[in-house]
Amino acid sequence: MFALSKTLSLHHMNKYYVKILKDLSIVKQIPAGSTILVGGFGLCGIPENSINALKEAGTKNLTVVSNNCGTNDEGLGILLNNGQLKRVIASYAGENHHLAEKYFDGELELELIPQGTLAEKLRSAGAGIPAFYTRTGVDTIVEKGGIPIKYKNHSKDFEVDIASQPKHVEYFKGQKYIREEAIQGDYAIIKASVADTNGNLRFVGTSRNFNEDMVKAAKVVIAEVESIVPLGSFGFDHVHVNGIYVDYLYLGGNYKKSIERLVYDESVYQKNPEKFKKAKNQGLRNRIAKRAAHEFKDGMYVNLGIGIPTLIPGFLDPHITIHFHTEIGAVGVGNYPLEGQELGDLVNAGKESITLNQGASTFSSSESFGMVRGGHLDLTVLGAMQINKQGDIANWVIPGRMVKGMGGAMDLVASGSKVLVVMEHTAKGEKKFLKDITLPATGLRRVDQVITEKAVFVKRNGELVLTEIAADTDLEWVRANTGFELTVADDLKKFDI
Ligand SMILES: *[C@@H]1O[C@H](CO)[C@@H](O)[C@H](O)[C@H]1NC(C)=O
């Protein structure tokens, strides 16, 4: 109750005007136990000043809602390391190893939610919608319940203390949907590029991401910005978020805008091979990417997952145009930047530095996943840990060992776009094609095609059929390294790449 009345009193002080703050003592006064929406995606577009203020205040027992929990020592990682977080509500944990350790040790609650569902939960809260229906997560552990949120402290066999609940399902036009409820924050701390003195906000690049959804979804909203300009400085057609949502504005400073994965255009590496030693032999992965490039048709709208999919653009026919969508919130992703061209406010969902092509546009996370969920993409390309013959796919968690999080993968495979999996045929000798997947599924019967360095499988009549094998292999190898019974196409082809 204390937390609630404090929340309300803060709100009442500034009923009508956005208040321009001289310092962040408001953030330092956020009570322990609050739920805080924290804008940004990885380290892109995060409210760096507000996070530091929370660290200085040492506020404990916080629930934070954010796409992921920063890195080992930046972004929300700062609050995690400082023992201030009770629960993290996120879609992805892959970049923060301390988070995984604390989670498996039972010291931290981690509530994983598919990225598009998370964005829509926030958008809904801001728009007064208590719940919505989605295909994302249908038939998986997201629907059935039982995702571990908290393990028992230091339990050796990973006994679960708190697990996610089963979801209500309903059928519309014969299709199953699950019901997801809105998430409202007590507070939102968000980051925009520019504000005017009415609190109207503008963002730059892909730093918009969750900031736009979160600024609408909390009882008290603190927006930090890099500049505050007089009214009329930007035209009314150029406001991204109206000031109606903003309670407090703070002119921030000292932005680090760290780029988690600085990647340059290939020409940069070729010009200076000594300076940039490539980590490992990309031969096998390049070969998969090269074969996958043949599936891209002129004009397609395509989402690329992290890993091997990001290599594909390097092998595309230069005469075709592909509109690349990235979940963080852009269509029209271009080449990696040249040296010096990189921007902290412009990264893809893999947190790599990017550029945008002419004709590109940027938008919020909920808009980005509206495109996905609404079936507007032509092709989704992603990696997998396990696949079965029916096209079930697992790629987000190994219980007790590794928790990446589903990120946007569950939304993407459920979207109805063609789903192409690119992966190495085995994982260090372990089979990845299995009769039954043993890891929690990302989606059931969703995979339309799989390309490995040795084989191509295409879904026909509900089953993956072997349609091509590599010139340097034979059927026996493929049979021995595939865990389900092969169905071989009558017109089996060879590919030589
Ligand atoms: C932590 O906060 C929650 C509310 O989110 C509250 O119910 C709980 O009592 C708090 N725990 C501690 C140890 O302060």
Image (spheres, rainbow, N blue to C red):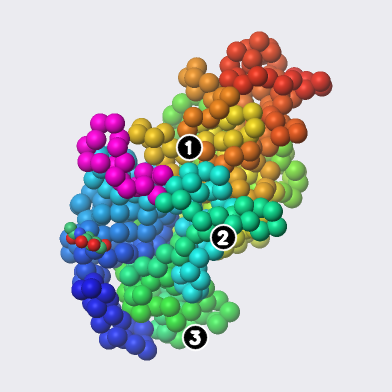
Residue 298 visible in the picture = yes
Q: Which residue is mark 1?
A: 440
- Residue in the foreground of this view, choosing between 48 and 338: 48
Proximity of marks 3 and 2: CB atoms separated by less than 8 Å: no
Q: Nearer the viewer, mark 3 or mark 1?
A: 1
For the point 70% across and 31% down, the residue is: 463
Q: Is residue 153 magenta?
A: yes
Q: Separation of disc 2 and disc 1 at Cα?
A: 22 Å
Labelled disc at residue 232: 3
Instruction: Give percent across and percent down for residue 240.
Output: 52, 73
Identify residue type, mark 2: Tyr
Give the SS element for disc 3: loop
For the point 62% across and 26% down, the residue is: 452
For the point 36% across and 44% down, the residue is: 148
Give the SS element for disc 1: loop
Question: Tag 2: Cα neighbours inside 10 Å, few (<14), some, or many (≥20)?
Answer: some
